[in-house]
Amino acid sequence: MRSGGRRRSYVTSNASELLQHTGLLPAVVRDLVTKQSILFSRSQKILDRMSPPVGF
């Protein structure tokens, strides 16, 4: 079981290294981060509209 886990982690680290070398990973991460921040700001605006201005 240990060897299997080690092999899996080795494969995943290899894949991440490969992605970093090709330059795909940063772009994907940036895209995800921007989408998340856009969604977050939208939900915050909706919440601000819905909730009454109570200081809490």
Image (cartoon, rainbow, N blue to C red):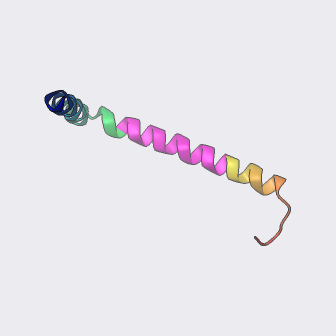
Q: How many labels, in total? A: 0
Tell me what residue is drawn at x 73 percent, y 52 percent. Answer: 45
Residue at the far left in the pictured view: 3
Question: In this rendering, is residue 55 above or below 5?
Answer: below
Q: Nearer the viewer, residue 41 or 7?
A: 7
Residue at the extreme front of the image, as rendered: 1
- Tell me the quarter of the picture where residue 19 sits: top left
Give the residue drawn at x 83%, y 52%: 50
Q: Is residue 54 above or below residue 18?
A: below
Towards the viewer: 24 or 5: 5
State which region is magenta: 27-42
**Place of residue 43 in the rendered image (x, y in percent of width and height, measured from the top left):** 69, 47
Looking at the picture, does residue 15 appear above or below residue 49? above
| Image quarter in which the C terminus is found | bottom right
Image location of residue 16, percent across then percent down: 25, 34
Q: Would you place residue 39 above or below residue 28 in this image?
A: below
Quarter of the rendering occupied by the N terminus: top left
- Displayed quadrant of residue 10: top left
- Magenta segment includes 39: yes
> In this orientation, which residue lies closer to the viewer: 13 or 45?
13
Q: Is 23 positioned to the left or the right of 39 in the image? A: left
Residue at horizontal 54 percent and vertical 40 percent from the top: 35
> Along the line of sight, which residue is nearer the eye, 3 or 33?
3
Give the farthest residue toward the bottom: 55
Prevailing secondary structure of the magenta residues: helix
Name the side, left or right, on which 13 lies relative to 52.
left
Q: Is residue 11 magenta?
A: no
Q: Where is residue 5 in the image (x, y as percent from the top left)?
A: 21, 31
